[in-house]
Image (spheres, coloured by chain):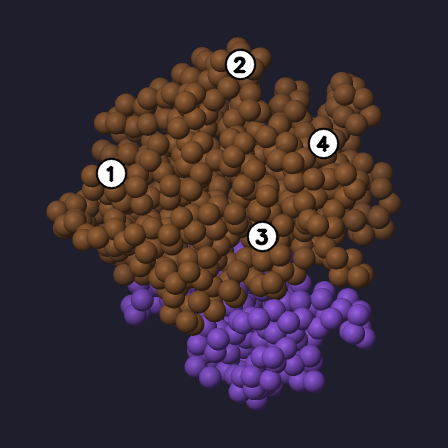
Chain colours: A brown, B purple
Amino acid sequence: MNKAIIIGSGISGMACAVTLADKGVRVLLASPFPSERSQSVMAAGGINAVLSERAEGDTVDSHIEDTLRSGAGLSGREAVTGLCTHAEEIIRYLEKIGTVFSVDASGHLLRRAFGGQSYKRTCFCGSATGKQIVSSLVMEVRRYEAAGLIERRLWSCFHSALIRDGVCRGVLLFDESQRKLIAEYADALVIATGGQNALFGKTTGSTQCDGYVAGKLFMQGAELKNLEFIQYHPTTLETAQKRMLISEAVRGEGGRLFYNEGGKRVYFMEEKYGRRGNLMTRDVMSREIASTGKEVFLDISFLDRKEINRRLPEVRDLCLKYRNIDIAREPIPVAPSVHYFMGGLAVHLNHETNIRGLFAVGECASIYHGANRLGGNSLLSALYSGKVAAEEIAGRENSGKTPDFSAFLKEENNALMCMLASKSSFPVMYIRDMAAETMNRDLGIVREEKALKRGISDIDYDLSVADRISYDSSGMPYFNYSLPAILTLARATLTCALERRESRGAHYRSDYPEADPACAAASIVAYQEGRYSVRLDKEFAYES
Amino acid sequence: MKVRVLRQIAPGTEPYWESFDADVPGETSIAGLLDHLNYHDDIVDDHGAKTTRIGWECSCLQGVCGSCAMVINGVPALACETFVKDLKGDLITIRPLQKFPVIHDLVVDRSVIHENLKQMNICIEEYQPEPRESRPEKGKAYLHQYMAAKCLKCGLCLEICPNYGSGEHFFGAIFANDCYLVSARNRSKTAEIKKLYGEHFGSGCSKALSCMDVCPMKIPTIASMARLNR
């Protein structure tokens, strides 16, 4: 294969790019901003791998079983086996390109314990694992750029895919610096654009991850999977701009959750689950916090200040900087927040979607995590998926003569010019904020039919007006043209949550609180002319 | 309070100052202040005249991505971790980084940073670190690599640097740190890297070290310099 285009330059996009370039495929790596701005840099925790020097008793099989268990029956065994089996190879690769892992005095990689895992197997780089991996991959991409195999294209926002007869032939990019649409053709298009944070407004992640690409491709015929499975992080701190993640390390160091009632502290997790109550898994903890209906606090102030300085310096700094809270003296007000999307573009084992030549990798693809993700598996899957897609693409034949897309290009260009000519001062963000309010209200941690139906009706209303409003065009045009697809993705997510009449993994329905064995399959949602059809993948069509 | 913003419609157009009235709590960050100004039904200047929304760049909003680098009251800083309460007086001035071409308002094109590193081929060809046991200073070098790799490529160090112009010959602290990261781990390339470092950093640096004062990651660039000068 000659050429591939990758949309998004975070860890999964870069992993795909360097693997392709290594196999001699030319790559156009397109993103609005450089890799240093990607959400990947925010991944703090670590990356799971059972290495040859491992905790006694640990095996790759144990990693596979932990991952499958966390996925609650919805992650395919073959996909997960591939992921876990290649984990050591990925860590060795990262070492080889210069990732600065945390090591012991003799240079061996340190491992930390992570929730839901049977053994200590999470490799890490201090408190900045994602950032350190990004830095080393940027340098590796640079090597191939200097060799002429990778071309980075900044200021480039995805507009739409160029699809004809079920085959993807390239992409339409909007260049923000020149304010115009540019068509690029290739033998394969890889989507590496992260999760759909913007559906919920403030989350723990980057403002750049908005789900537009998945939503637009959905409207263009790509199927989406497991959208209802959204991981909440139980302990986040509200700030004016966003929700900041308070690391699980605080609970690991003995932090206690409580709320106030009648002037007394109620340690509700300990009351319900005993001594280890504060160490319950993310989904249980999030539901418990939400069900108190009260302001919940996380207290670590009983630890000596010196110990806090030594063990929790990042949490100390963050609370002080953004909320003026001294964690050595006062408890931290916390609430759960949207953190990771298990759902996204439905992909086969080779990471191709139902559209030939269209691939998805990283968080925007749904394959390894099933109904809930195991901590430490997201960085692993970002790297592994990028490599798998690249190996598949490199082994393919060229796609042949490109069909004529000029009529499509002209039509899209005219629509965009109309949008840019608007003199309105109405900000498109108002509609996005309204939709986020709906999603937070009706698709929260605990869900039920009435609220989900209300959410669908509200998003349908937003969708019905979105195209008829003129928006302020003085900002980034991307925000304006991306709105309908983001709303469509929101509608698809609510529809999946409504259709799954059971509780499983991160999806909890108060009207169907138990898991139903008849529903033990992934949700696949398809779109056709405004209609959303959801089916359970009982034939395991995407497990091949 | 008054907020003055240096604005520019597009690359190559004339920049102009615009003033706004704002009343926000002291805990608000400059990122929050910009959002506050932008998200009303209309955006008006301090004379009540309608204007356009202010363009600026953000991603993580917690000081780890470097998107929102700008000059606030004369000091290069990240908007998401600069707070109103820490600024003196009732006037806040915000301008884009001036050592990079403006795309729109506070959004600048920092691709020269990446371009220079690419042109000089600052990358590891073959991983050849020093064996750990042979290092006299034990883990210190390793720790410094961790710090240097935290660089956000935000450009604040270049903005404040008295020696950096537009990146034509002198490439600034970012270059020095990446040179160190390669020379320490690709020993067969060390001589070549040291030469490039000398040409594009060492010979032009007047050691004002203001780069370290504004670095959001607190990278001790001086340690990279010391190691490369050995």
Name which of mark 2 and mark 3 comes first in the sequence: 3
Question: In the rendered image, which quarter contains the C terminus of chain A?
Answer: top left
Could one spot residue A197 in this view of the protein?
yes
Q: Mark 2 near mark 1, Cβ–Cβ under 8 Å?
A: no
Q: Position of residue A325 (x, y in %)?
A: 71, 44
Disc 3 marks which residue? A90
| Residue pointed to by mark 2 | A517
Q: Which residue is mark 1?
A: A166
Chain under disc 2: A
Question: Toward the viewer: B10 or A78?
Answer: A78
Q: Look at the numbered disc 1 and give the secondary structure of its residue.
A: loop
Is A289 above or below relative to A402?
above
Pointer 1 or 3: first along the chain? 3
Can you identify the residue that label 4 sits on? A297
Circle 1: residue type? Gly
Under mark 3, the amino acid is Ile
For marks 2 and 1, the one nearer the N-term is: 1
Q: CA distance from mark 1 to mark 4?
A: 52 Å
User: At 27% across and 61% down in the image, what residue appears?
Assistant: A178
Q: Quadrant of residue A66?
A: top right
Task: Say which of marks 4 and 2 sits in front.
Answer: 2
Q: Is residue B69 above or below residue B119?
A: above
- Residue A498 relative to residue B9: left or right: right
Q: What is the spatial separation of the Cα atoms under label 4 and label 2, in whole angstroms?
A: 37 Å
